[in-house]
Amino acid sequence: MVRIDVRENDVEHALRKLKKAMNREGIIREIKFRRHYEKPFEIRQRKKREAERRIRKSESRRPS
């Protein structure tokens, strides 16, 4: 669970920190996926694409 303390009534700064924390935790991404029903096949397909993207990304980072 994400928790952000507001200091010195600086709500805008706390809001920025909250958005960053939620983004890091993957909460925003999860909300986007749950806006509509995703069939089990679509979930498997999406996870497979994400795994392929991660593999390609890690391979491109390796020195030749």
Image (cartoon, rainbow, N blue to C red):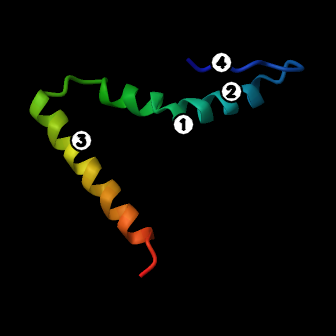
Please indicate whether residue 24 sits to the left or right of residue 61 in the image.
right
Residue contact between numbered discs 4 and 2, judged by CB atoms under 8 Å = no
Amino acid, disc 2: Leu
Q: Residue furthest bottom?
A: 64
Q: Residue 16 in the image: state x and y as whole percent.
A: 68, 33
For label 1, count other residues whose C-alpha is less than 10 Å away and answer few (under 14), some (14-19) or many (20+). few
Question: Spatial distance from mark 1 to mark 4, Cα to Cα?
Answer: 13 Å
Tell me which numbered mark, 1 or 4, is placed earlier along the sequence: 4
Please indicate whether residue 43 sits to the left or right of residue 53 in the image.
left
Q: Residue at x 18, y 27 (%)?
A: 38
Tell me which numbered mark, 4 or 2, is placed earlier along the sequence: 4
Amino acid, disc 1: Arg
Instruction: Please name which of the two marks, 3 or 2, marks the residue nearer to the observer.
Output: 3
**Residue annotated with mark 4:** 3
Q: Residue at x 60, y 31 (%)?
A: 21
Tell me which numbered mark, 1 or 2, is placed earlier along the sequence: 2
Please indicate whether residue 22 sits to the left or right of residue 43 in the image.
right
Residue contact between numbered discs 3 and 1, judged by CB atoms under 8 Å = no
Q: Secondary structure at mark 3?
A: helix
Q: Residue at x 38, y 28 (%)?
A: 30
Q: Residue 58 in the image: state x and y as whole percent.
A: 39, 62
**Residue annotated with mark 2:** 15
Amino acid, disc 3: Lys
**Residue annotated with mark 1:** 24
For label 2, count other residues whose C-alpha is less than 10 Å away and answer few (under 14), some (14-19) or many (20+). some
